[in-house]
Image (cartoon, grey):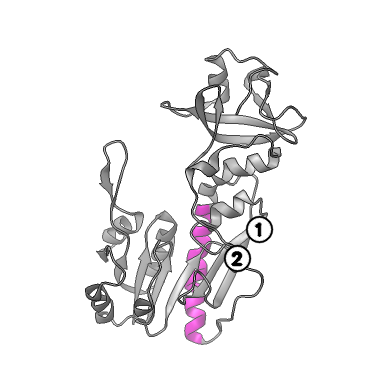
Amino acid sequence: MSIIFFGTPSFAVPSLEALLRSGEDIPLAVTQPDRPGGRGHKLIPPAVKEFALSKNISVIQPFKMRDPEFHDRLRSLDPEFMVVAAYGRILPKEVLDIPSGGCINVHGSLLPKYRGAAPIQRALLAGESITGVTIMKMDEGLDTGDIILAKEISIDDADTSQTLFERLASLGADALVEALGGLRSGRLKPHPQQGEPSYAPPLCKDEGRIDWSKSSRQIFNLVRGMHPWPSAFTFLGDERLKILKASLAEGSGAAGVIESISGGRLLAGTGSGLICIEELQPAGKGPMQAKAFIAGRKIREKHDKFS
């Protein structure tokens, strides 16, 4: 029997690739419509679409989840499972009821923590030290279905949303193949989620503004969680700056004040501790190292201040 795959961004590609590698029959991939992007606003296909077409898998990109023709197309394939990995839309009951074995979701957190659209970023923003992936049977709720399998990993200080996406995508792909095998053999039995749920709504750009009264650790986590999109940001005078990379530093200083630019290191005070800004991007310009940024400006230590 076949599997219909639902997914959109690069996070989903390793799961689709793992299914193919394990010998699964994937006659169809469902992904979101192409979106305009870049300076020319050209239509850009989702990562799943590009990968699926490269493997000669048919692709459809429905605009509406309740379209009867879309449902008929899914039913015509008589799927055993539908696998969903970062598809980006809620599936209605009419779709969830189609596969004989149910709909299986690859979710980037240890449920019931961080239900929702941005579990990886929210875990970083919250300063979590452990996260993981959950393979679950989908129901009509928001990531409320029974758990088939969960795998955890540690979060390192070097992690950003981008690197954690990559690590969890790989972990999720392996866990998915293991979960399907366990379901078919009866070795794995779905069980209800346990514990207090938390939620991970989508990020918005305004959340990236740095509040310098917060601790250096909180600001460090903001920079990591917001990278590469939408990016943490601040202002130096009237100039808007994206903060792309930062690290924790020893010492203390006044919140937002540039305490030192010695040796090309840009150290700023926070509500508690110092933070070292390593890479930033002024509005309308490309990313640059702190040393290059300092060289192009007359910055006064212990006087100029981020806001």
Q: Earlier in the sequence, mark 1 or mark 2?
A: 2
Q: Amino acid at mark 1?
A: Ile
Q: Residues within 10 Å of mark 1 (few under 14, many from 20)?
A: some
The reply to whether residue 265 is in sight is yes
**Region of the chain picked out in magenta, as a range:** 165-185
Q: Quadrant of residue 274?
A: top right
Q: Which mark is residue 130?
A: 1
Q: Is residue 62 left or right of residue 180?
A: left
Residue 220 figure quarter: top right
Quadrant containing the C terminus is: top right
Q: What secondary structure do most residues of the magenta stretch adopt?
A: helix
Residue 156, relative to residue 272: is it above or below?
below
- The amino acid sitting under disc 2 is Leu
Along the viewing direction, whichever of 197 and 75 lies nearer the viewer: 197
Residue projecting furthest to the left: 69
**Relative image position of residue 1 (x, y in whole percent):** 33, 82
5 left or right, relative to 242: left
In the image, is residue 193 above or below residue 153?
A: below
Identify the secondary structure beneath mark 1: strand
Q: Which residue is rendered at x = 37% and y = 59% of the image?
A: 8
Q: Is residue 228 magenta?
A: no
Q: Indicate the position of residue 197 as horizontal and vertical percent values.
A: 62, 67
Q: Are the residues flagged by discs 1 and 2 in contact, CB closer than 8 Å?
A: yes
| Residue that sits furthest to the bottom in the current view | 186
Give the image location of residue 35, x and y in percent: 30, 50
Examine the structure image and report whether residue 171 is included in the region drawn in magenta: yes
Residue pointed to by mark 2: 110
Q: Residue at x 74, y 34 (%)?
A: 273
